[in-house]
Image (tube, rainbow, N blue to C red):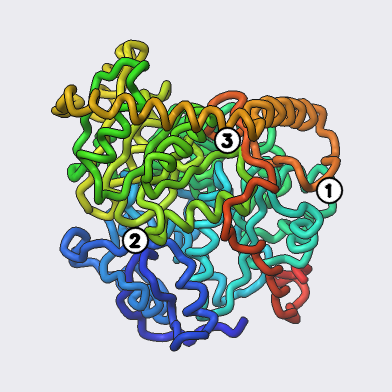
């Protein structure tokens, strides 16, 4: 792609709007990229500082493009991290959810790529597919002015195609560790595509450095050049991140810790409440809250298992709510269709497992409802971060049973405040009991007739077998199975088969056009990249 004009630099903002950098009228590639980019516009007064994106050292074309996305001022974590990332430093960045961490590595990567365009220039690793797609769209929107080529490497997509696209050396690869590790095992020659990699990013690093990825992640990092720049970003600094930082420092690598949330506080604009509800009437109270408390609000309900997620979705749909569901049993096409439906406002309620709990930027989510408290306090923090984003107000309501009581104190310690009791009228909720019970019974019958229980068990067996294969470092048998590392659903949680896709689901994305070939001087930064 042609390098953009250099010279005086202008103001800009973090990725998060509906437009695209250097976008023209309707029909342009930039406008098309932006139309698919889920980026929230931040109220200017909340992020207004004396610092502009131009003062952070970004190229003029890039900052002007950010302005066209509707952003004006950088957030605290962007002010802290963009200059050292531009300078090539290894960075660990911590800040509250919704503070624009993606821009902290996306903008500097595009800045340097425009001056020396080759592939694979940067690799971004994310724990779940939905976040991978979101990060890729941010790169496309912000990099539309230079025609950046971005490839998502995730489960649920054709492995042969993904391997071929890696070999063609797209500029940016955004991947889940499980699928990328499987590709590298199946074709060790693909490692050559990364031999001149300049930047490696671990997005949601706290999740990537858990046991779920302990086999795949080291294999990926082992094929990357030791001279690469390493960036870790998260909303929580965990012991695993601290240990990695200490190990890198011991190896002689400088790693800056940039903490925009040193006290690990929850968002000031976030209200956090609870309701004590016996399990037997939990579904009834969800119906009551959606009908009486949040009839016009955009809500995300987090369910602990796939079974409950699908049951909630079907029950609320039968009760007439505009609802869609998201879990890892679904095909990739269905998952994207559900997210698009929620983002577009055709559904105001999203019922999801923890596959939607991290990193996803869905503008204007007013309420998060936890159906039970998660085991890990970090999961509670990340779920809560789906609302109150970019300085907006938000509300988290947790429906607690007797089994959740011992989880309350650790969560309150973690967020630095007490959960407040939400006032409800029990009589009004109980009035809905009969109607809710009938809808739930019908939903259970529909799921039973569809063989949903069997699909869950089959998927659980497939995941277990896939884990055994990865341990044996076996080659993948095909491209149809789940190749991501275990996702954030409850153990044994499977997903919907290809045939069960939602009506109106969009077709698979068209193959990306290969990047234009570039002649490079022997021994240059991108030598051998073509």
Residue 421 in view = no
Question: Circle 3: is it few (<14), some (14-19), or many (20+) Cα within 10 Å?
Answer: many
**Residue annotated with mark 1:** 188
**Residue annotated with mark 3:** 487
Residue 17 in view = yes
Q: Residue at x 34, y 61 (%)?
A: 40
Quadrant of residue 272 in the image?
A: top left
**Residue annotated with mark 2:** 40
Question: Circle 1: is it few (<14), some (14-19), or many (20+) Cα within 10 Å?
Answer: few
Image position of 509 with respect to 232: above or below:
below
Q: Quadrant of the C terminus?
A: bottom right
Q: Position of residue 65 (x, y in %)?
A: 40, 77
241 sits left or right of 163 in the view: left
Q: Residue at x 31, y 72 (%)?
A: 70
Gap in angstroms between the C-alphas marked 2 and 1: 39 Å
- The one nearer the camera, 281 or 490, is 281
375 sits left or right of 29 in the view: left
Q: Residue at x 60, y 74 (%)?
A: 116
Q: Position of residue 340 (x, y in %)?
A: 48, 58
- The one nearer the camera, 509 or 3, is 509
118 sits left or right of 261 in the view: right
Gap in angstroms between the C-alphas marked 3 and 1: 25 Å
- The secondary structure type at the circle numbered 1 is helix
Image position of 393 with respect to 60: above or below:
above
Q: Earlier in the sequence, mark 2 or mark 1?
A: 2
Quadrant of residue 509 in the image?
A: bottom right
Image position of 4 with respect to 320: above or below:
below
Q: Residue at x 37, y 64 (%)?
A: 16
Image mark for residue 151: none
């Amino acid at each position: 792609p042609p390098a953009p004009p250099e010279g005086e630099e202008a103001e800009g903002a973090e990725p998060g709007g509906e437009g695209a950098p250097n976008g023209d009228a309707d029909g342009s590639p930039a406008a098309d990229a932006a139309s698919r980019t889920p980026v929230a516009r931040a109220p200017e007064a909340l992020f207004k500082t004396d610092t502009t994106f131009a003062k952070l050292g970004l190229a003029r074309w890039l900052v002007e493009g950010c302005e066209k996305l509707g952003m004006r001022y950088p957030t605290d974590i962007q002010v802290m991290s963009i200059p050292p990332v531009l300078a090539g430093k290894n960075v660990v960045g911590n800040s509250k959810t919704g503070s624009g961490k993606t821009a902290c590595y996306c903008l500097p990567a595009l800045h340097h790529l425009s001056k020396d365009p080759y592939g694979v220039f940067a690799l971004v690793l994310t724990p779940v597919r939905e976040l991978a797609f979101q990060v890729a769209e941010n790169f496309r929107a912000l990099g539309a002015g230079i025609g950046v080529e971005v490839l998502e490497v995730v489960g649920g997509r054709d492995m042969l195609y993904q391997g071929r696209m890696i070999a063609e050396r797209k500029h940016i690869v955004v991947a889940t560790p499980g699928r990328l590790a499987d590709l590298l095992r199946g074709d060790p020659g693909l490692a050559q595509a990364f031999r001149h990699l300049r930047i490696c990013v671990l997005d949601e690093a706290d999740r990537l450095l858990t046991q779920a990825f302990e086999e795949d992640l080291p294999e990926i990092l082992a094929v990357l050049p030791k001279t690469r720049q390493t960036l870790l970003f998260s909303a929580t600094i965990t012991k695993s991140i601290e240990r990695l930082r200490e190990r890198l420092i011991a190896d002689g690598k400088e790693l800056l810790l940039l903490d925009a949330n040193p006290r690990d506080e929850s968002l000031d604009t976030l209200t956090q409440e609870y309701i004590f509800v016996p399990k037997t009437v939990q579904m009834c109270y969800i119906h009551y809250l959606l009908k009486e408390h949040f009839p016009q609000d955009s809500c995300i309900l987090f369910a602990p298992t796939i079974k409950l997620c699908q049951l909630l979705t079907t029950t609320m749909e039968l009760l007439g709510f505009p609802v869609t569901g998201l879990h890892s049993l679904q095909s990739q096409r269905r998952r994207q269709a559900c997210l698009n439906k929620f983002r577009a406002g055709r559904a105001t309620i999203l019922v999801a497992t923890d596959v939607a709990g991290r990193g996803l930027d869905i503008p204007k989510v007013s309420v998060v409802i936890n159906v039970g408290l998660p085991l890990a306090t970090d999961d509670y923090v990340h779920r809560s971060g789906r609302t109150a984003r970019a300085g907006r107000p938000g509300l988290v309501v947790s429906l607690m049973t007797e089994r959740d009581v011992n989880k309350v104190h650790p969560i309150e310690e973690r967020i630095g405040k007490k959960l407040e009791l939400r006032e409800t009228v029990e009589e009004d909720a109980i009035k809905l009991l009969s109607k809710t019970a009938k809808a739930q019974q019908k939903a259970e019958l529909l799921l039973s007739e569809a063989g949903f229980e069997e699909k869950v068990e089959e998927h659980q067996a497939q995941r277990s077998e896939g884990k055994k294969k990865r341990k044996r470092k076996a080659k993948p048998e095909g491209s149809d199975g789940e190749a991501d590392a275990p996702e954030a659903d409850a153990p044994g949680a499977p997903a919907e088969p290809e045939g069960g896709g939602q009506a109106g689901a969009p077709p698979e994305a068209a193959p990306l056009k290969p990047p234009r070939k570039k002649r490079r001087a022997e021994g240059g930064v991108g030598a051998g990249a073509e």
